[in-house]
Image (tube, rainbow, N blue to C red):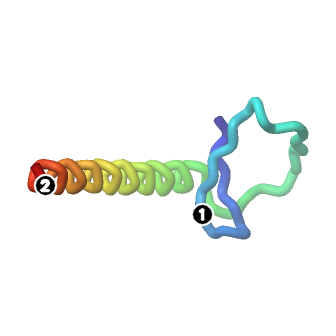
Amino acid sequence: MIVAWCELRQAFRSFRTDRVLEAQFLAERYPTPRVRLLATWKKEQKKEREARLAKGEAMAERKRAAI
């Protein structure tokens, strides 16, 4: 998996390496340091994981209440 910042969406995106047909390596670098980008990505992943867990718990609670 390749994780990269998307300027168009202003968000991180992930790409499956088996679907990448072509890539170009540029000398130009993104201005934000790699360490900060990685920390931001990890924080976003944690938020998304917690949101999915909360949604799953809420759905389970509704299912139990319906029985």
Label number found at residue 39? none
On screen, residue 1 versus residue 61, left or right, reads right
Q: Residue at x 44, y 50 (%)?
A: 45
- Residue type at mark 2: give it: Ala
Q: What residue did someone put label 1 on?
A: 11
**What SS does tag 1 mark?**
strand
Give the mark nearer the N terminus: 1 vs 2.
1
Where is residue 65 drawn, in percent x and y? 9, 55
Q: What residue did someone put label 2 on?
A: 66
**What SS does tag 2 mark?**
helix
Judge the density around disc 2: few (<14), some (14-19), many (≥20) Cα neighbours within 10 Å.
few
Where is residue 64 drawn, in percent x and y? 11, 49
Q: Are marks 1 and 2 in contact (CB under 8 Å)?
A: no
Q: Residue at x 66, y 57 (%)?
A: 5
Judge the density around disc 1: few (<14), some (14-19), many (≥20) Cα neighbours within 10 Å.
few
Q: Residue at x 29, y 55 (%)?
A: 55
Q: CA distance from mark 1 to mark 2?
A: 38 Å
On screen, residue 17 versus residue 53, left or right, reads right
On screen, residue 41 versus residue 3, left or right, reads left
Residue 21, image quadrant = top right
